[in-house]
Image (cartoon, rainbow, N blue to C red):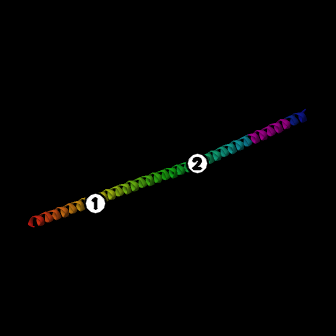
Amino acid sequence: MDGNHIDNNHNNTLTITITGIVVVTVVVVVVVVVVVVVVVVVVVAVVVVIVVVLIIMVIVVVVLIVVVIIVVVIVVLVLVVVVVVVVVVVVVVVVVVVVVVIIVMVVAIVIIIVVIVVVVVILVVSTSYDN
């Protein structure tokens, strides 16, 4: 009877020990898996945040480049319009001045011709009266 009783206690102790080892192993495995999952999730989250920040930076840079290009194009167009307007105004002023000068010259020539004709007529008439 005593031998059986000792064997039973020994078997119970062995069973409790094996159960304890299995429980500890399962707990350690679960903790390791949870830690690994948490680390992987944190790493993936950090990578996603970095990628999103990089994408946002690229978008901002592209938008800035587009804005700069648009501003440069607008400035160039404004400069072209200003240059064209200045050239047109200068050409119009030059043409008007040339036309006015030509008209004044023609009027002056006509006045000179009229004066010459009047003087000649007066001279001819006065010489004919003298005779």
Q: Secondary structure at mark 2?
A: helix
Q: Quadrant of residue 11?
A: top right
Give the Cα separation between the discs numbered 2 and 1. 68 Å
43 shown above or below 101: above
Please tell me the numbered disc located at residue 120. Answer: none
Camera-nearest residue between 41 and 50: 50
Camera-nearest residue between 110 and 93: 110
Residue segment shown in magenta: 9-26
Camera-nearest residue between 67 and 24: 67
Camera-nearest residue between 131 and 69: 131
In the current view of this chain or complex, which residue is farthest to the front?
131
Task: Classify mark 1: residues with Cα within 10 Å, few (<14), some (14-19) or many (20+).
Answer: few
Q: Which residue is mark 1?
A: 101
Q: Quadrant of residue 94?
A: bottom left
Q: Is residue 17 magenta?
A: yes
96 shown above or below 42: below
Please tell me the numbered disc located at residue 55. Answer: 2
Q: Is residue 11 left or right of residue 88?
A: right
Q: Quadrant of residue 92?
A: bottom left
- Residue drawn at x 73%, y 43% as measured from the top left: 28
Which quadrant is home to the C terminus? Answer: bottom left
Q: Main secondary structure of the magenta part?
A: helix
Hey, what amino acid is under mark 1?
Answer: Val
Q: Is residue 33 left or right of residue 129?
A: right
Q: Give x and y (percent) for residue 63.
A: 52, 49
Q: Is residue 25 magenta?
A: yes
Which quadrant is home to the N terminus? Answer: top right
Q: Secondary structure at mark 1?
A: helix
Task: Classify mark 2: residues with Cα within 10 Å, few (<14), some (14-19) or many (20+).
Answer: few
- Residue drawn at x 50%, y 53% as measured from the top left: 69
